[in-house]
Image (spheres, coloured by chain):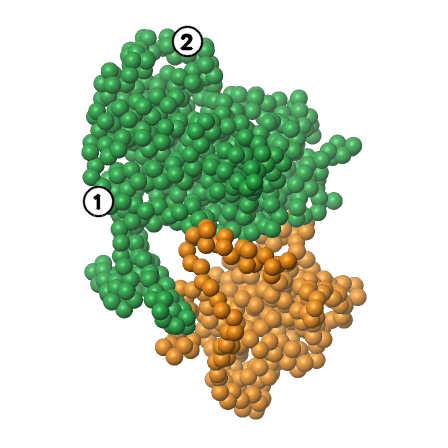
Chain colours: A orange, B green
Amino acid sequence: MVNVAVIVKLEPDFSEGNVSYNPDGTLNRAETKSILGPHSAIACNAAFYTKITYGSRISIGTMGPPIADSALKQAQELTDADEMNLYSDRIFAGADTLATAEVLRSGIVKMLDGNKIDIVFSGHRASDGETGQTGPQTAWKLGYTFLGNVIEVNIDLERNYVIVKRLVMLQGFDGIVEEVEAPLPVFITVDPSYSPNYRTIYQRLAFAKYRKEAIARANNYKQFLKIYDSKSLGVDPKFVGLPGSPTIVYRVEKIPKAKASRKAQLIEGQDIDAIKSIVPKLRPIVS
Amino acid sequence: METFDVAIVGGGSTGLAALKHLSDLGKQAVLIEAGPQVGTKNVSGGILYSKRPRNGKVHNVEDVYGSDFEASAPLERHISKYILHATSGNKIFTLDLTPAHEYQTNFGYSVLLNKLNSWFASVASESAEKQGGGIVTGVHVRDIQWSNENKTLIHTDELEEFQVKAIIAADGVNSEIAYLTGARQKFSPNEVYQGVKVVIRLPEETIEERFEIDTSEGAAHLFAGDVTLNHIGGGFIYTNRDTLSLGAVYHYESLFSKPTEPSTLVNALIQNPFVSELIKDEVITIDIDRELSKEEQLRKRFALTKLVKTFEELRYSCYSSSGRTRLIDSGKFKNFEEMKAKLDSIRQELIEKYNTKFVTNYVELEYSAKLVPDGKRCRMKKPYHRNILFVGDAAGRGIFIGPRIEGLNVGIDDAVRASLAISRSIDKNNFAEDYMGQYYTSLVEQSPYTRDMKEIDKEYLKIFLESTKSIPKEIVGSRYGFIFKIMSSGKLRGLAVGIANLLGYEKILPLVESEETYVQVPIEVALKLGKKIDPSYTPVPPSIEERVARLRYNDDPISHIIVREPESEFLRKLVVLCPTRCYYHEDNKVMLQHEGCIECGSCAKGTEWRHPRGEKGVIFNYG
């Protein structure tokens, strides 16, 4: 039995019609609905793949305020998780990525009744943080092999290895895929382009069956929910929250607009002749 | 290799009924649907009927899904009024055809297929799982092969190949299984109707007020006359819970002989003064000052869309009894007055703070199109090929007799008959054509629906003529006046129908389905007897580009249509007849831009036409 953990984050819903901004252009968190982060959702899809293909057990963890349990509920809908954990304490507030990683590490070792977690999945980054550091730092704290930008996951159950494909970016090349194998346990951040590949009817039917079970479970998600504070998690207050965060945000500035050196001609509307007049200008550039 | 008893190709209401019934018969079946979810590719103009013919038995939807079907399924409205309008300019003459609609009918509901088929799927998959089967979505069947050992192998674009004992082809009017296997030719324009539909939004109680129905009722309105722009066919409006299905259905050959853009035909109906009053709504137009900085514009836009969303949601709940109850139960509002006050305050804010305008127009939610097989002309006489059985639209089976338009119920009836034939074959392990195929054909031939596709029903005709008796016969024109007179007399009617049925539909159709019956007679009736309507505004339908832009697509860079004869006469007509203008002229050739395709198959006859790969293509939210 493979034990799988997913760490997720509750993030603001940036879609039009849901997001609100303050007059100074900063995010109005009170007026903006929060949802499971889009990258967290992709990590959930990868975990669900391991459940369908290898019958893994899944536990989900998140650090956040009490309302972050809504992210867990959404994650359970995607993964059919057996257990969910919310790490919530006032002293966790103000955490940077390193202090967050400390909480997550402490949580992961307690998952599934303390059974060793073989694979931890996380998103590539958060839509409201964008640093992409929490995953690698948690991996480092756990002492797990870190695999980033993963687009395909396979497990060799006999050898206890994962074989993954990673999307590697090299200047001048687009989309190099690297195949890596690593002994378990591993920490995987899932690339945004990940999409699970179910190639047989039985996998597809299992997907439909577990998805249905997942929705039913998510409707009673509190039954699967464990809530930890700093004490029950057993973390040292020095390493979490603001005191545990070496990062200092000194100031946030807008990136100044680059000065345009070229002159732009604006063609509006649906005037075919005007649009056609662009073609001869484009031709030399294209050729 | 994975092996299953039965594969059902296509997850429309017919395929789903087959899955449900086969599973209930204890057989293992897997349904393969190309759309990302069930119901995203289905379009229906109309009404889901349950029938009780005097002679013979049909298998109704409630026979398949259980007697509590009406109570549990997401049906729109129980159609209790069936009205036919003849139009000419701003004059309209109205006939009540409710008795014809109720003829041999248990019930008829307006439906939206995205919602309904999802419900069918959830019920059917539960039964299927018990037999080791189920529904697989996002998979497109590419090919079917029979190996030397007579194994049937299904190849798809997405999955490893798998093996089955029998197949039900429920892949619609543009059945690829039929083309692949050569079981039938592609339908020619003479054999099908082209339907184009828009879903229009209106608050629940506005619908009830305008169509003079109560909350448990629904209405169907059909239109003939000048709204047809001289084509054979007509327009329709069906009331849904809080939307309307409005569309135009025309004999495809009639459109071919004088090509008119499908969207123009829908617009003609929308702009009819009677119709425009039915669909009228208050529409919010957003205008953001372009002089503002880009950031400020964006901020305004975000704030505004959120406010508009709140306003619209509240407005819809406020004008629906269930919506009001929900809001009051949730504790958000104490009573209707409070909702109304909140609505007014948001409205005020929209006008004063954001310079929003409220104008009179109507709101279109979704544009779609579909070919409708005319069973009189194109039903498959041999609805099988090897161990494949064809059902519903795929077998060209639909009832199209004047104002009587049925397809969903016919498909469900076929699905049960195919399930019975396959179940018997599984028990005897015999899937040969002369055992399974021929048995299925005999079952289909026994269906009262098949009889309706072959001959005129005297009783139905009588009821129809009863409804038209308010029209003086001399208006109908010399040729039809005479026919009407004969048909209105009991004794002569029996004789006339007998002779007509002897001649067969092929001989009678040119007389019955003609420009005279669909266009000229209604125009004359409306002109002479019609009521004058004074329109209070002129609706402005969206352009075809706007209609396409509002649709949801999962674009496939690979085109599912290949043009082999870019200079053919057929494709030249498609430049006009494609509902989303996918074809255009360039250097005397017809070029295809497949991205806007809504997969109606109007061009299938003249191209290499396939459905898009799994999950690709258009995704209908209403259907």
Residue linked to disc 2 = B499
Q: Secondary structure at mark 1?
A: loop
Q: Amino acid at mark 2?
A: Ile
Chain bearing mark 1: B
Visible residue check, residue B414: no
Secondary element at tag 2? helix
* Front in this rendered view, residue B370 or B420: B370
Q: Which mark is residue B536?
A: 1
Residue B71 locus on image (x, y percent): 39, 43
Binning the other alpha carbons within 10 Å of mark 2 as few (below 14), some (14 to 19) or many (20 upward) gives few
- Which of these two is toward me, B195 or B396? B195
Position in image of residue B450 (x %, y %): 49, 22
Q: Amino acid at mark 1?
A: Ser
Residue for point 47% across, 43% down: B580
Which residue is at 34% across, 49% downward?
B363
Question: Can you tell which quarter of the image residue A269 is in?
Answer: bottom left
Q: Residue at x 55, y 45 (%)?
A: B594
Identify the mark at residue B46; answer none if there is no mark: none
Count of marks placed on residues: 2
| Chain holding disc 2 | B
Q: Residues within 10 Å of mark 1 (few under 14, many from 20)?
A: few
